[in-house]
Amino acid sequence: MFNIAICDDEALICSHIESIILEFQQTIAMKIKIEKFYAGEALCKYIEEEHDFDLIFLDIEMKGMNGIQIGKIIREVRDDYKTKIIYISAKNHYDRQLFDVQPLHFLAKPLIAEKVVDDIKLAIRLSDKTGGFFTYKKGFEKKQVLIKDILYFESLNREVRGVFTKGEETFYDSTENVLRQVDQYQFIQIHRSYIINYAYVCRFKYDEVIMSNGEVLPIGQSRRKDVRKFQMSLEKDN
């Protein structure tokens, strides 16, 4: 089951997104559950009652509680960096404060069905519903960890340290081999020694990133431009 919320104070927009999702569901085996909300307060109350979503389509400009406020509650108050948020807006530019919410994407109104479907496919692939694993060797043993449970990798000469949501593991490998496995899942190499999972970044700064576990990792000088491009490509509508 993949749980999607749609929150927009325009009922027609909610119905439009719902119809796109329902049509897409006919092409896949996974069942999708959809909940619609016409006010930010209603969505927040539902979440506070311990209801979780894998993906939220969230309008930025709403009367009362807006999309920015809701995103900050999800990320900062509930400490939830797994739920994917796709912002929708009639505007074609976005305030820098939205970057702290770490949205998966921005979609401009009027919505294009193909772009909505592409983002749903990406959200499904990035979630544990797809069963994505990173595989590594520890001695003679072959081990796996869910992609969604990886915060970052650190290169230690001939070894790599993987930092996960539950513990860490050190194994022999190269950053090149690690990146080859994970780059399709929104990982980026920010430094010759670090490959990070975008899903667990709390904040990007000019020369460092702050991870959800509080660790501060450096951005290499030669990689700052690429990191910025990577960030912008995920945080605005192409």
Image (tube, helix red, strand yellow):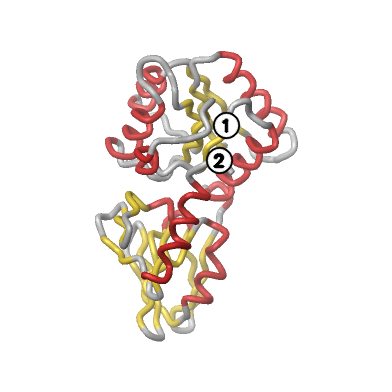
Q: Which residue is disc 2 drawn over?
A: 237
Cα separation, mark 1 vs mark 2, equals 7 Å
Q: Residues within 10 Å of mark 1 (few under 14, many from 20)?
A: some
**Residue 10 picture location, percent across and down:** 53, 15
Query: Residue type at mark 2?
Result: Asp
Vertical position of residue 130 compared to residue 50: above or below: below
Residue visible at 57% across and 59% down in the picture: 184
**In the rendered view, would you say 51 is above or below 124?**
above
Q: Secondary structure at mark 1?
A: strand
The percent coordinates of residue 115 (x first, y second) are 65, 38
Q: Are marks 1 and 2 in contact (CB under 8 Å)?
A: yes
Q: Tell me where residue 78 sits by quadrant.
A: top left
Q: Which mark is residue 135?
A: none
Residue positioned 42% across, 45% down in the render? 82
Which quarter shows the C terminus? top right
- Image spot of residue 88 (x, y percent): 52, 30
Q: Which residue is disc 1 drawn over?
A: 108
Residue closest to the eye, 216 or 83: 216
Residue 93 against residue 215 in the figure, above or below: above
Dividing the picture into quadrants, the one containing residue 1 is top right
The residue lying furthest to the bottom in this view is: 158
